[in-house]
Amino acid sequence: MGMIGGGKGAFIGSIHRTAASLDGLVELVCGALSSKPNVAKESGKDLFLKEDRTYTCYQELIEKESKLAVDERIDFVSIVTPNYAHFQPAMLALSHGFHVMIEKPITFTLEEANTLQRKVGETGLLLGLTHTYSGYPMVKQARQMVKEGALGKIRKIIVEYPQGWLSQLIENEGNRQAEWRTDPARSGKSGCMGDIGVHAAHLAEYVSGLKIKSVCADLNIVVEGRALDDDCNVLVKFDNAAAGVLIASQIATGEENALRIRVYGERGGLEWAQQEPNSLIARWQDKPMQVLRSGANYKDPLSSFAKHNFRTPGGHPEGYIEAFANIYRNFSLTLLAKLEGRVPSAEELDFPTVADGVRGMAFIEAVVASGMSEQKWTPFIH
Amino acid sequence: MGMIGGGKGAFIGSIHRTAASLDGLVELVCGALSSKPNVAKESGKDLFLKEDRTYTCYQELIEKESKLAVDERIDFVSIVTPNYAHFQPAMLALSHGFHVMIEKPITFTLEEANTLQRKVGETGLLLGLTHTYSGYPMVKQARQMVKEGALGKIRKIIVEYPQGWLSQLIENEGNRQAEWRTDPARSGKSGCMGDIGVHAAHLAEYVSGLKIKSVCADLNIVVEGRALDDDCNVLVKFDNAAAGVLIASQIATGEENALRIRVYGERGGLEWAQQEPNSLIARWQDKPMQVLRSGANYKDPLSSFAKHNFRTPGGHPEGYIEAFANIYRNFSLTLLAKLEGRVPSAEELDFPTVADGVRGMAFIEAVVASGMSEQKWTPFIH
Amino acid sequence: MGMIGGGKGAFIGSIHRTAASLDGLVELVCGALSSKPNVAKESGKDLFLKEDRTYTCYQELIEKESKLAVDERIDFVSIVTPNYAHFQPAMLALSHGFHVMIEKPITFTLEEANTLQRKVGETGLLLGLTHTYSGYPMVKQARQMVKEGALGKIRKIIVEYPQGWLSQLIENEGNRQAEWRTDPARSGKSGCMGDIGVHAAHLAEYVSGLKIKSVCADLNIVVEGRALDDDCNVLVKFDNAAAGVLIASQIATGEENALRIRVYGERGGLEWAQQEPNSLIARWQDKPMQVLRSGANYKDPLSSFAKHNFRTPGGHPEGYIEAFANIYRNFSLTLLAKLEGRVPSAEELDFPTVADGVRGMAFIEAVVASGMSEQKWTPFIH
Amino acid sequence: MGMIGGGKGAFIGSIHRTAASLDGLVELVCGALSSKPNVAKESGKDLFLKEDRTYTCYQELIEKESKLAVDERIDFVSIVTPNYAHFQPAMLALSHGFHVMIEKPITFTLEEANTLQRKVGETGLLLGLTHTYSGYPMVKQARQMVKEGALGKIRKIIVEYPQGWLSQLIENEGNRQAEWRTDPARSGKSGCMGDIGVHAAHLAEYVSGLKIKSVCADLNIVVEGRALDDDCNVLVKFDNAAAGVLIASQIATGEENALRIRVYGERGGLEWAQQEPNSLIARWQDKPMQVLRSGANYKDPLSSFAKHNFRTPGGHPEGYIEAFANIYRNFSLTLLAKLEGRVPSAEELDFPTVADGVRGMAFIEAVVASGMSEQKWTPFIH
């Protein structure tokens, strides 16, 4: 693997590296870790990269790597730059035959995402997207329970993602994360929705197997002086007519990363919360509530999709890094299968792809349009 | 106290009686407990009422009681009939000089509520309304913390009230509660909103001290064959521009009575959940989360409004009946003060009144109108 | 009902009154509410007792009441004085034909308890004991599940009762509760064990259906200057050879009233915590954990013993006062059955009696003896 | 790093590898992964080890590696064999100048542990021990809060470690883990205490900074046919006279890995539970309970020892693997400092060493002796 972005001081780059290496399937061997050459070099040294594979821009990385012998060069690049700088390296990598892993949201605009999707289609290469939260085993368990009809027809979905870290104008106080995430030139049309709302939307669709069909969005800039939405409440309709609510906020003061989803069907409901990710609550119409636990060894066993994604027996909590690693792991296993001429299993293929990325961008378009509309419902066309 | 409605088999009537008598301030001495004379009589006997004060209709109760000597007759009536049968006994009672306690929603229509409010104004009598959930000590603590500015300006409110008991068409299976609550002729314009949405709206306004200014409602009939909404998602704007979400559902399968509110301000956020009512979670921008507990004896003490409303030291859980009783207790203490020519304290005056009832009916009007509108925002005029 | 003790400023007396009257079965009609005549009189006035039934000592109460006409005089006395003053009024009441309800621990010494038990036997009267915590519906559910063999043979019991209220020497700072509870002359041989350890022991035996056979106790006086144990850790053996731990502490700083029990059998385990009393956690060898909820309406229903003891549907939390009231309610229903010549149901008979009281006193004897012994195990003889 | 043990089918070996590599500081380059040569070879292949560094016994590994050039050979070995096979490879590794990481309990007998400690002393090499649970950031936070006196003098400690996985005789059903852990010839004198009791004892001493001075143990074999204790309850005295309870069980049916500790001092108490490891509950005498969260950025900041040991901001749960990795990380950073001639920081030095291992073995001796004694207290001599 080669990494584009993620140099010193970046948050998500180091998570990608840890996640990628967790299961011993992926090795970081080169990088263009910063757009500033000296930072790129220093960062490479810190990560024990060889000097001749520490590049100072993504073009150099892709071109030089593509000239190495097949068994020496990287298989894929991981793109962990800010949103505006996803598209070009991704296109270039695909053009040179490299598979791509990319941080969400996939691109800066929907148009870019569509172009990227076409490119992926043409090249037949893999593109993975780190919608981390769908990497948790108990999220996969929830998805399978819904799929197998345990809840009956899905009727209602509540997904919420409250954070509090932007409850003050910290982008003006030197917080780098806050700076680019609240900057339209680097983040795109939406702040809160682009950063965390897409995660919530992806999770809702992933767990329910449904597609959002229309939205009614209330997008707010709560902190004075901010340029992008930091608080969003959205009514949602799904393609099976189920109704829902999607809440995302960066000004829910005191909240950390409290992503939570509840899905209710005719016969039961499921609840999963990211901050206690090893439990899945199942409620039933006429039976006691259950708490299913990651790693558990039940007589009526957890789904193969859940089992494929934990490493430890019940009671040994796995967390965010492991969920992140599951995306890399499944991406890598699928890639390995491809390289070995083997058909990947459904469990291996279970990672977010360019299609999810496009859908995420279309979602951002829809909620931003709805946010500006006087009309109640805005269709989510895609 | 005399009771109108609440005979054999009724749920809320028995709660009213238990709550009223909990603190030894109120005694049930007469009743018109059912519109069916024989049920009224049997119910009276079960409750040890004297035969001559077991009436068979509310008119009889009010007229006969009003002819008794002042120190013998009741001070107030408690009206616990279905929604459509609140208005007339309440008006009659007020006309005869009786104070009134009434189950929510206050009336069948907004018009009736307005009339009732005028009548209360003219007579100078008390009208209490059992918005039970505002009777919990830690709800009062939350309200006072907001009032005193602990959170700074309020920015966001999420209030939700998921229940699952109507996830099947049980009104057709002989469930009496379900029958009248899903019947427009007895419940009014709205099912879910009229039954539990008004509680959520009241709680949001009570805790935040804000007023809802406009709503964008998605009201659904999820269970086929039902006549009234059973699932509602509402975007809300408050008068200080804070945004919010109000969710109420009777088809959230497996949920019991999971009313929960979160209020976020500039400096912190509060969370309270009805099913664990003795805790109030406080989150802070830069300090660890706290859990304040009912009955606790802190150096920086709980608010006098909280203290006034619990009976036991910390760790002795109080629940729904006690919250209900707090409304009766404050109503009774205020009544007592009035009778004794004393000015009631702010803590005694802290119970829902006809003004809250009118607001509740206006809220139902607004969300029903919004539910049918193509426009995003419907003003909540009142 | 007539009350002995429980005048102004007492804690438990007011709980008894509230609990007794909660269900409309019991009425307080007379009292000897304090050993100080003027306090007794004022307290009677506050409680709306008639002047001629406001007595100034228990002897007066018992004698005068016994001379009233049968349909006028009280059926039973409730004794809520400090421990040292339980025995004599209880004996006198029984001698005069009154049934007795008594606050735990039943007496000052085991000898008194034995005498009382004989007296109860001779008179054929009822004696109820307020081991409050066995009054909770989900405790009863746990007991029935164990009884019906859901867990298989019981192997291990952990019962703990941490409180923090005596973590400072508050008995020297004017705290009346603390004064008498830490005073050997008023509390008896043990402080912490006598006050809360007996509750824990009773709960363990009640839920498991087992009897404690031997104990190995570490009783400590942690706060310097205190005269009685305030922190106790006990190893326990039950009559079926199950092992257990009983922890009781008044110096677990910051804890409120955190009574909790866990019972493990061959096939599963149960957990119940007094501070969230409406849930019962069931863990299983090979199935997901369940949370059973008070008031719930499951297809495989809650036990009749649980159902008999809640008043509201699931999600309407009931608490300490309701649990307390359940003891009064079952005592009263049994008394009523007796008066009506009816055989009480098993559910009605389900309240702690003199036998539990004697056992509690024997338990205190055993742990105090063990606490002073160098030997590991001290038999719990009774 | 070279690994001894941990071949195919082993649990803890794979955890060690993942943990070691998580932070990119350690690379597995050789192994003697099984005592069965063919398993050793296959396991090496699976882990991408070079063939010539895939050894078939630990002697070969240590001798061959010691002959490699300094910059080529391993720095340390990681010993993950069953308990009985820790001592000899550890001694041999130290003799050849290799540092050692070792799975707990450190050796088979106390005598071995003492010998090993002397050897470590003589060689000046590092020996790390994976008492995983002390690797959690919030455990370190707890330790520092105690150290800095936030709770005042420590008075009471409750540490419990209930598991349910051995509630049936699964060692006879082909469960390899169960086989060796319940076999005195491979596990040592104690089953439950040797496997998990030592973790609990270590955690109690680590958090409190106190030393256990005497024990009163009740060790039981609950499952018929088992050869070692599977359920243990222990009264404990600490060197400052604080009392405590240590519970460890493998037959607490339905429990996963529910290690939990509570420490109470004069002014407050702390609670930490392994299954929700990112929270630390702090209770106070006269202030609301707090929940401190790993990764949080408080004004009054988390301890440098906590901060040093998490990788992600608050709300991104870290778990068991990360805690495990923290031990490898601190061990490696200390080793690195040593290699670079730098003095390691207190935070880097914060990992369990041979001294903890010896103490663990002495603890096992003490509780086994106490378990067989009729006397209440057995001194914990060490």
Image (cartoon, coloured by chain):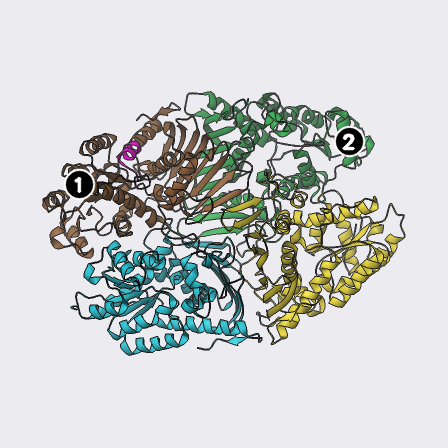
Chain colours: A yellow, B cyan, C brown, D green
Q: Position of residue A260 (x, y in %)?
A: 57, 55
Q: Quadrant of residue A200?
A: bottom right
Residue D242 covered by magenta stretch: no
Q: Position of residue B3 (x, y in %)?
A: 28, 63
Give SS at disc 1: loop
**Amino acid type at mark 2:** Glu
> What numbered label is drawn on residue C98?
1
Q: Check the picture and name the quadrant holding the N terminus of chain B.
A: bottom left
> Is residue D209 rendered to the left or right of residue A118?
left
**Amino acid type at mark 1:** Phe
Q: Position of residue B42 (x, y in %)?
A: 26, 56
Task: Tell me which segment is drawn in magenta.
Answer: C346-361
Q: Position of residue A368 (x, y in %)?
A: 65, 70
Dot 2 corresponds to which residue? D42
- The chain ID associated with circle 1 is C
Q: Residue at x 53, y 26 (%)?
A: D364
Residue C347 covered by magenta stretch: yes
Figure check: B273 above or below C147 = below
Q: Quadrant of residue B60?
A: bottom left
Figure check: B309 above or below B242 = above
Label 2: how many Cα within 10 Å (few below 14, some 14–19, many 20+): some
> Is residue B372 rendered to the left or right of residue B137?
right
The residue lying toward the viewer, choosing from A230 and D202, is A230
> What numbered label is drawn on residue C77?
none
Q: Are marks 1 and 2 on the same chain?
A: no
Figure check: B341 above or below C347 = below
The residue lying toward the viewer, choosing from C7 and C324, is C324
Q: Quadrant of residue B137?
A: bottom left
The residue lying toward the viewer, choosing from B64 and C84, is B64
Figure check: B264 above or below A70 = below
Give SS at disc 2: helix
